[in-house]
Amino acid sequence: TLHPMDGALYARCRQVQQLSDLCGCDGDEAAFFAHGLGVVALHGQGLAGGASAYAWDDAGIEVEIDTLPPFRRQGVAAGCLAAHRRVHWDAANPISARLAERLGFLPRGEYEVIEWR
């Protein structure tokens, strides 16, 4: 089932490495709830995944979608889209790109990303 992210779900997602990015790019709970939104998918009482704002600006949000492996390809992503915001989708892989296209996003091209750890 899908549930709007609240403080308790935010805290639970922060505790799961594969879902921690659902809490925004800087992990600041107050900033997340001031600017972002999220939907968490539960399987029973356990976390399955979610869709949320990873980053935001005045024009819109960047969507973060994370799903635990047993629950992938079951529709977890759709809850984050909000009619009053322009959503940016950064497809990090072909699966993400196909999902974005199914949800109506149009490809704008590729660009180089530098990742450091």
Image: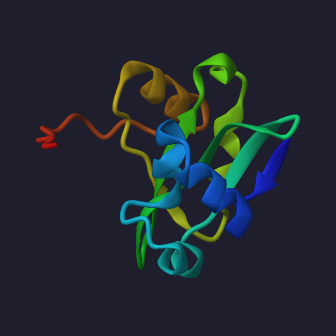
Q: Position of residue 18 (x, y in %)?
A: 49, 36
Q: Quadrant of residue 67?
A: top right
Residue 105 seen from this side: no
Q: Is residue 111 above or below residue 60?
A: above
Instruction: Give the vertical position of 35 relative to 82 (above or below).
Output: below
Quarter of the image holding residue 47? top right
Count numbered badges in the picture.
0
Vertical arrangement, residue 35 with respect to residue 3, above or below = below
The quadrant of the picture occupied by the N terminus is top right
In the rendered image, residue 87, in percent from the top left (x then y), is placed at: 50, 57
In the picture, the quarter occupied by the C terminus is top left
- From the viewer's perspective, is 2 left or right of 107? right
What residue lies at 68% left-to-right and 22% top-to-bottom?
71
Q: Which is more toward the observer, 87 or 19?
A: 19
Residue sitting at x 60%, y 28%: 68
Horizontal side of 108 relative to 10 (left or right) equals left
Which residue is depicted at the point 71% across and 30% down?
Answer: 75
The vertical placement of 97 against 103, above or below, is above
